[in-house]
Every structure is written in C-alpha cells, then in structure tokens.
Amino acid sequence: MEAGLLFDPLFRLPLLVGAVLAVLLPVLGVLLRLRNEWLAALGLAHLAAASGLGGLAVGIPAVLGAPLGALVGALIKTLLGGRGNTAYALMILAGWSATMLIAANTALGSAIGHALTEGQLFLAGRVQLMAALVLATVAALALPWLLPRLVRARLFPRQERANRLPAWRWHLSFDLLVALAMAVGTGTVGLMAAFALAFVPPWLAFRLAPSWSLTLGFSVAAGLAAYLLAFALALYLDQPLGPTLVAVLGIGAGVAEFVRRRAAHRWSRSSKGA
C-alpha cells in the first residue's frame, strides 16, 4: 500500500479512537495489576463481547451494546464482595459460552463473533469516536479521585475498616470504569487486543519502572507506541488490527524482557567482579 494511506482522511477517526483506548487501557491495567485483578480485563471483555453480539442481533452497534454486559458483571462482582481473579475467571467462562451460543443461534453467525474478537476499528465512525471521548472524559474526571484511594486500599487495607470509610464507593466506581473501558475496547479494537493493552504494558512497567509515576508513564508510552506501530502495519500489510496489535505487544514484551535479563546478568557479573 502507499505510505500516504496512513494519513488518508478515511482512517483519521479509527486512528483517533484507537489512540484514546491505547492511552486509557494501560492506565487502568496498572491499577488492576496493583489490586492483583489483572484478569478483570479479560473477564469483562468476554461479557462485553457477549452483550455486544446480542446487541448486534437486534440492530444495536457493538460499541453501544457491549457496555451492558460488562457493567452488569462489574456490579454483581462488587455487590457480592468478590475480590481477586476468581470472579473474573467465571466471567470469562460465562461470556465465552454466551458469545458462542448467540453466534450459533442467530442470523449473525460466527463471522460477527470473529469480528468482535479481531476488532472492527477500521470501520469506526462517529459513534465509536463519541463513545471513546465520553469514556476518556469520565476517566479524566474519576481517576484523580480514584487513584489515591485505590493505592491506599492496596498498601493499607485495614485503614478503610478501621476508619469505617465507605470504600465500596471507589471500588465500585473503578470496577464500572474498567467495565466501560473494556466494553468500548472490545467493540472497537477487539476482545484480545483490548485485553493485551490492559495487560502487557502494565506488566512490563511493573518489571522495568523504578517508581509509581514512571510505571504509569511507561505503561501509557508502551501502549500508545505499540498501537501506532500495529495500526501502520495492519494497513500496509492488509491485516486485521486486533491480531496485529497483540503480536506487536507480545514481541515487544519478549524483547524488553530479554534486554532486562541481559542487563541484570551483566550487572550481577560486574558486581561480583568488583
């Protein structure tokens, strides 16, 4: 393909929609990893895929139908007091089962199910852009309030109980924000790509960054860089974006881990020699 295709007006909206998600999902992934609930991204994405497919069956765009299942899952998890990854593993099973059954028993067939898994970003329009911008606005307003409370809850878990703080408010708010973000991500970049953005950059950041602020910054930078590279490769090579983005993140993670281990090995040898 021609190099100018990347800057074609046809792809400006999809590029912007994906960029918003590539910035936001890694930030939420950092907080999920801090809470040891990184599987939440995949569990909520599966529920979003199921409700998104159900919405498509009745003529509702996936980016609008997907949030329902994810929000309901997050609400039930919080109300039942579930913590950790067990609740999200059950969501994965429930969401996968519902997605397969809907695909098998509606006129949509398995093709639409594959579309949700692989992503439909290149078909994104104003509806998807509005959903991404609303999500970004909600996150920009909520995260300054949520961040210190979630960090405190992780580092000093007994403080909430000792001071009788209404902790359910920020835990539920964060769960709903993650559910909304994963739903929009599933309806645009695809189920596994949305999960990869929320999982891989934070995983690398926790292993490489020396401070909390650098962890957030590194995670955002890695997610956005991987997305832009995957977007260009998917256009030039005529490939679906979702699998391309997952591949770029996976290869990048492997290279970064190899470099980290080599550096650690050299430092160990030099310290022993000294």
Image (cartoon, helix red, strand yellow):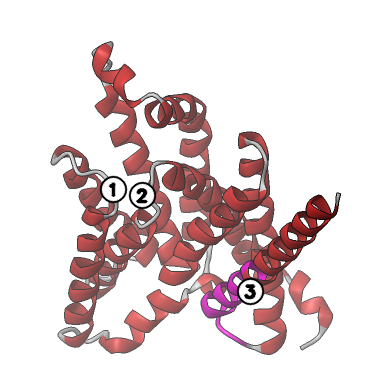
In the displayed structure, would residue 89 be above or below residue 81? below
* Residue 158 visible, this angle: yes
Up-down: is 218 above or below 51? above
Disc with the residue nearer the chain's start (3 vs 1) = 1
Camera-side mark, 3 or 1:
1
Neighbor class of circle 1 (other Cα within 10 Å; few <14, some 14-19, many 20+) is some
Looking at the figure, which quarter contains the N terminus?
A: bottom right
* Res 247 → quadrant: bottom right
Camera-nearest residue between 132 and 35: 35
Q: What range is drawn magenta here? A: 239-253
Residue at numbered disc 3: 248
Q: Nearer the viewer, residue 147 or 35?
A: 35
- Position of residue 144 relative to residue 257, above or below, is above
Amino acid, disc 1: Gly
Q: Residue at x 40, y 76 (%)?
A: 117
Q: Is 47 on the left-hand or right-hand side of 230?
A: left
Give the prevailing secondary structure in the magenta stretch: helix
Q: Which residue is mark 1?
A: 84
Residue pictured at 26% horizontal, 62% vertical: 47
Q: Secondary structure at mark 3?
A: helix
- CB atoms at circles 1 and 2 under 8 Å apart? yes
Choose top left, top right, bottom left or bottom right for residue 251. bottom right
Amino acid type, label 3: Val
Disc number at residue 37? Answer: 2
> Picture coordinates of residue 198 (x, y %)?
49, 56
Secondary structure under tag 1 reads loop
Mark 3 or mark 2: which comes first in sequence? 2
